[in-house]
Amino acid sequence: MKVLMVVTSLEGGGGGSAYRLVQGVNKLGVDCRALVQDDRVGAEDPKVIRARNGAFRHALTLLVRKLNIDPLHRYPQREKELFSVQRYPDTLAQQVAALKPDLIHLQWICNDWMNIATLGRFSEPIVFTCHDMWPFTGGCHYSGACDRYRGQCGRCPLLHSEREDDISRRVWQRKAKALRGRNLTVVCPSRWIASCARSSSLLGGAHIEVIPNGLSLQSFRPLDRRKAREMLGLPADKRLILFGAWGNSRRKGLHLLVDALGRLRAEGRQDRLELVIFGFHKPTEPSDHGFNTHYLGLLHDPVSLAMAYASADVFAIPSIEDNLPNTAIEAIACGTPCVAFRTGGLPDIIEHRENGYLAEPYDPADLAHGLAWVLDDEGRRQSLGRRARQKAEDEFSDDLCAKRYVELYRELCPKLGMPSSGVPYGSARAAGRRALSV
């Protein structure tokens, strides 16, 4: 069996998950390659193929933005969140056909790489992993309180548009045309994103599976906290709250965490607690978070990330909306309890008062209560950490993720003889369904 993974880049959340999957399914005997626009990760890997027009399209995207001719500039009041139109022509259908895959696996394909119409030009069976909501919306990657993706989009609140025929409606129409009649299977990493996809007008009729992303449990594992703090230059005698978000999007909820920290400060905890942040550098004019704050900057390698998680007493995830955030899985794999809002895919990772704490959505008071609940009892905190690690071992290893996908590939291409993964047919994915059942 030949599987072709199509993904914009192999770095970041969705891209990193895709690359681990490429490596994992190859270990199980499936010939899997990745066709990418950006090969800064995997450039020396023979399983990674850079698309012929990848560099050109990246340059074209930058030029379009510089010349201010991007269609989104028609919406000057739009929110500064990612919105992907995917309208530029490409030659991906021809390149894919030349590689002759038995199955195409679409991962994160945005950043103006794959034209939406290209989706309709593939004749092979397609697996489409929803790393966010973009596959079934009119362009947004997270819709917030908007559910217009259940219809045909239009009047997009993210664009601050009052027009029914705005660009979100036109993107929706292009997707509907491209997806019509496709042999499509949709994979969702979380139950939440699966529920959203099932309720959408674009993917509601598709076959939808839930397969969580995996990660290396050898790279992300419990480490000595004292040594980790020493390596990162963090204080040994403080309780540390860790927060991490790439780029500090408002969706990641730092403002809600700051509110919660203000409540902890009002309780007189400022001499015992400190905040640690990774994912972005210290601002020129940093905000006052109410506690002494350490900025670790951008952490790309697993060793640095694992040390950051190991150094913390608790990992705070105040996301307003999130699919199945890698940071949460990485944290529990390192034995660090998480405190988050009960929203998105986070309940698939955090079991309330078992391996962490789920606060009522967007309530900073309950978020503060959860942080205090973890921090105020060291025995409880350690017990939560052990159960967190066990959760990662049971459900989120990269090997298990690969086995689940291999079983799906086999189901979709039953006539294409392939070596056994060593797992009885359907058992790995069935176990995943049981683990994720409500």
Image (spheres, rainbow, N blue to C red):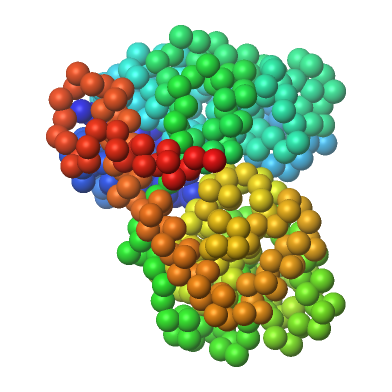
Q: Give 276 or 281, whichever is nearer the viewer.
A: 276
Residue drawn at 79 percent across, 23 percent down: 155
What percent of the width, then of the height, locates residue 379? 55, 80
Question: Which quarter of the image is occupied by the C terminus?
Answer: top right
Asked if residue 163 can be seen in this view, the reply is yes
Residue drawn at 31 percent across, 22 percent down: 412
Asked if residue 63 can be seen in this view, the reply is no
Q: Is residue 317 above or below residue 61?
A: below
Q: Residue furthest bottom?
A: 237
State the image quarter where residue 1 is shown. top left
Residue drawn at 82 percent across, 26 percent down: 161
Residue drawn at 63 percent across, 72 percent down: 374
Q: Is residue 335 left or right of residue 126?
A: right
Q: Give 257 or 295, whichever is nearer the viewer.
A: 257
Q: Is residue 332 left or right of residue 360?
A: left
The number of numbered badges drawn on the structure is: 0
What percent of the width, then of the height, locates residue 218? 32, 64
What percent of the width, then of the height, locates residue 89? 50, 21
Q: Give 11 or 407, whichever is nearer the viewer.
A: 407
Q: Is residue 381 above or below residue 79?
A: below
Q: Is residue 95 left or right of residue 306?
A: left
